[in-house]
Image (spheres, helix red, strand yellow):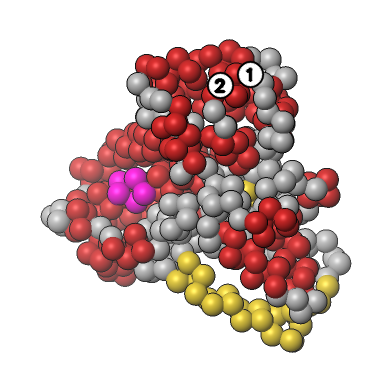
Amino acid sequence: MAELISLENAQTGVPTSRAGALVVSDDTLLRDPFYDGRPRRERAAVLLRLAPCWFRFGSLQMLAADGDEATLRLLADFVCERYYPEAAARDGGRRYSRLVEDVGRRTARLIAAWESVGFTHGVMNTDNMSLLGLTIDYGPFGFLDRYDPNFISNSSDSYGVYRFAHQARVGQWNICRLWEALMPVIPEEEHGHIERILQVYVHEYETHRAELLSRKLGLNRSTSAVKLADRLFELMLAARADFTMTFRQLGDVSLETLEAGRVEGLWALQSLTAADGWSDWLTDLRAEMDRQGLFDTQRRSTAAGANPRYILRNWLAHEAAEAAERGEFEPLRQLHTVLSRPFTEQPAAEEAGYAKPPPDWACTLRVSCSS
């Protein structure tokens, strides 16, 4: 567990593999990033990533598909004994059903954490899902600009299978595939336990989501706080409001200021003030604060620690990558420095426009598995 904690993103709290080194070459590669028959030359680079281990759901699936029960059991035992002591403590084959349950818990919490910062992974097939509940295989990912539950980060995901709001369901589907892979070593009397395991997954996801969304509003976890968050999402969708800065700016100013409609300079909130239901939402937010016995200073303090000001928006990554192609690495270094403290307002980031509305051309960017 210590290894997992050390690999949790210290800035956002999202469990993840980490980047250890980036090496860029003057050599070029011919690549077709969008599979459209228009290849281009790009500078070659190698990114070293670190994680306690790189075993995925697919690692067990491949062994099951090959009928290699001995190696399947060997790998499952290693994962239990090294990373899941509660599962390892179970007798015989009973440990494998507990393994799936525990992987499900971590996966559910991971996806709730993704959603709390507007992150869409983009390609959640089982070979890209860590058995440790870490974010791995960063490819066609993306952070939300304006809130859109149907946001698709991967340009090759034509059917929106991995869209933002569908990630928790995909995670549940993947848990079913993991269960199927381990069926050969799970005792027959436990074969029906998958229903309970899926219920555990849903409960873990909903509980962690409730905790994170409540904190983003500056509230303690409660059913009514989650309902407030979900109603805010509806308002944001109607107003085409920015995900990150809406939450951030809600905590930047007092509730009294919001109620008075004084949102000059708060660009993400300006569209919301005209949305039907905004005033009622603010009234209910105040009522929830009163119910919880919270002062507005407490709300703002909690929200400030839960809502980053800066995220890796696609247009920022694109500009840094374009500069690096020209041999100019300062934009990349600045981006890395700013994102290492995403909750802290930084003069260099403000001057570069990191917290301003995305430029119009940002919505035309496309990202694929080869980007």
Per the picture, the main secondary structure of the magenta-coloured stretch is helix
Reading the image, the residue beneath label 1 is 260
Reading the image, the residue beneath label 2 is 256
Q: Distance between the residues labelled 2 and 1?
A: 6 Å
Furthest-right residue in view?
Answer: 38
Q: Does the magenta stretch include residue 255?
A: no
Q: What element carries label 2?
A: helix
Q: What element carries label 1?
A: loop
Please name the residue shown 77% across and 71% down the image: 323
Under mark 2, the amino acid is: Glu
- In the picture, measured across the screen, residue 58 lies left or right of residue 159, that is left
- Give coordinates of residue 37: x percent, y percent: 85, 65
* Image vertical order of residue 11 relative to residue 260, above or below: below
The quarter of the image holding the C terminus is bottom right
- Give coordinates of residue 308: x percent, y percent: 55, 47
Under mark 1, the amino acid is: Ala
Q: CB atoms at circles 2 and 1 under 8 Å apart?
A: yes
